[in-house]
Amino acid sequence: MAVIRFLRQFALLLGVAWLLVPVVLARSHRQLQIYFIDVEGGQSTLIVTSQKQSLLIDAGFAGERDADRIVRAAKAAGIKQIDYVLITHYYGDHVGGVTDLLKKIKVGTFVDHGENQEDSDATKKHYANYVAAIAHFPRVVLRPSQGVPLKGLTLQVLAAAGDHITDPLPGAGEANIYCASEKQPPDDTSENSRSLGVLITYGRFRFLDLGDLTEQKALELVCPNNLIGNADLYLATHHGGYPDNPRALVWALHPRVVVINNGPRKGGNPQAWQIIHDSPDLEDVWQLHYALDSDKQHNSAEAFIANVDDKSDGHYVKVEASSDGRFRVTNSRNGIERNYGK
């Protein structure tokens, strides 16, 4: 009996050792880091390349809270400056934090979609504050098919200022079978619809961030033909709102992992969550917050949620990706991580 127990234990240890092999291999590769920073329902996503170049997509709300959380993520990533700050659009939960951020960390170049075109007092004010804050910094206006020079990866603009790419990306362009079930969305002239949406490619790994692109503009990218192709990692559009994560978009992407940058009472819509959850080939949904206005059936398991109540401590979701397409997602609140392989 003792021999049998020994053999069983040996076999178990051997099995665990084999399970650890992919983790060890993944950690030994030079990796792309992505930090989904908790700004309570806005957006701030820090991307650090394997060569320590950095890109921040949006800066959250005005005030020290979000700026401090961005700096904390930068420190965790091992960087002392942000090379590029890309602003998707001029709403306060995306551009409001720029002034405070500049007081706390060195920034290189600002990237955006150009002039504000929304005729609302709030958006005009946010845009004016942004322009004043970056007056002495380099500024680049991007259009669809353009990008940012980051070593080791490709950033391609898919949508900007209401326009979008018209030719399919390499390997894309197939007819989208999910378009037939979509209703004609209403016209939208908001700043959301002018979001600067990007695809980031690191070897075989593809990450899609469309900002707050609304339903009409999102569908134009995938209907009647899918111009994007697949995405390994998808940041749910408009904080996981509905109808801005239509089935014809999400399902056509075949994401393996979706991150929802919602707040406790903003985003994380149950209908959008269900569409995402049911997407073909999806493995997991990670959330920045438990959506308090939803229900347990339309929130991920607690292990996959960075902040579980409205008394947030600013926990983030971190992604580490290898150029072979494998990546790991970690919840900074509890240290839980999952590996996703090609």
Image (cartoon, grey):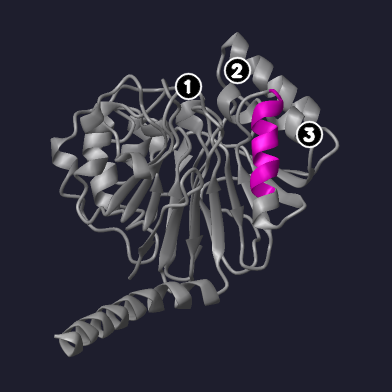
- Above-or-below relation of 245 to 257: above
**Which residue occupies 48% across, 64% down?**
321
* Front residue of 84 and 117: 84
Q: Quadrant of residue 16?
A: bottom left
Looking at the rendered structure, the secondary structure element under dot 3 is loop
Percent position of residue 259, x then y: 40, 44
Disc 3: which residue:
134
Q: In this view of the protein, which residue sits in the foreground, 147 or 203?
A: 203
Say what amino acid the circle numbered 1 marks: Ser
Look at the image and give the residue range highlighted in magenta: 63-74
**Residue found at x 13% / y 36%:** 181
| Amino acid carrying mark 2 in the image | Thr
- Mark 3 → mark 2, Cα distance in angstroms: 17 Å
Q: Quadrant of the N terminus?
A: bottom left
Residue 221 at least partly seen: no
**CA neighbours of label 2 inside 10 A, class few (<14), some (14 to 19), many (20+):** many
Give me the C-alpha separation between circle 1 and circle 2. 10 Å
